[in-house]
Image (cartoon, helix red, strand yellow):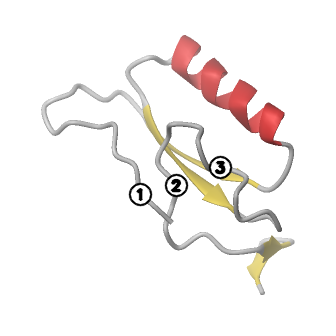
Amino acid sequence: MKRLYHIQPNWPIDICFAILVHEDRELVNQLINNVRYYCPKSAFDLYNGGNDATLCDGLGVPICTSSRKLKHGWTQ
């Protein structure tokens, strides 16, 4: 899994979001767009806790390299 970085050390960041996603790529994309629109100086990292290992691929945002399937808040 390729790690993407879009944050530069000198950029002002207001909030850093860790976003747990597990299904529905279109909703993940809408969430990314909403965060970018309403909080443009934020950064985020997606944690894929679902079955689809490619869910976050190609969305242009960082993906947590330790992502793995979650079930009710516990790792499997």
Residue 46 vertical placement versus 34 (above, below): below
Residue 68 lies, in percent from the top left, at 67, 74
Q: Which residue is mark 2?
A: 63
Mark 3 or mark 1, which has the lower sequence index? 1
Q: Which residue is mark 3?
A: 56
Q: Does dot 2 land on a helix, a strand or a loop? A: loop
- Residue sitting at x 78%, y 87%: 76
Q: Position of residue 14 (x, y in %)?
A: 35, 27
Answer whether labels 2 and 1 touch (C-beta < 8 Å).
yes
Which amino acid type is shown beneath numbered disc 2? Ile
Residues under numbered marks 3 and 2 in contact, where contact means CB atoms less than 8 Å apart: yes
Q: Is residue 9 left or right of residue 71?
A: left
Per the rendering, the mark at residue 74 is none
Name the residue that disc number 1 marks.
Answer: 3
Q: Tag 3's secondary structure?
A: loop
Determine whether, in the image, residue 45 is placed left or right of residue 33.
Answer: left
Q: Residue at x 42, y 28 (%)?
A: 42
Q: Residues within 10 Å of mark 2 (few under 14, many from 20)?
A: many
Residue kind at label 1, given as amino acid type? Arg
Q: Residue at x 80, y 64 (%)?
A: 50
Name, please, the residue furthest toward the left: 10
2 shown above or below 69: above
Q: Amino acid at mark 3?
A: Cys
Q: Residue at x 49, y 68 (%)?
A: 65
Q: CA distance from mark 2 to mark 1?
A: 6 Å
Q: CA distance from mark 3 to mark 2?
A: 7 Å
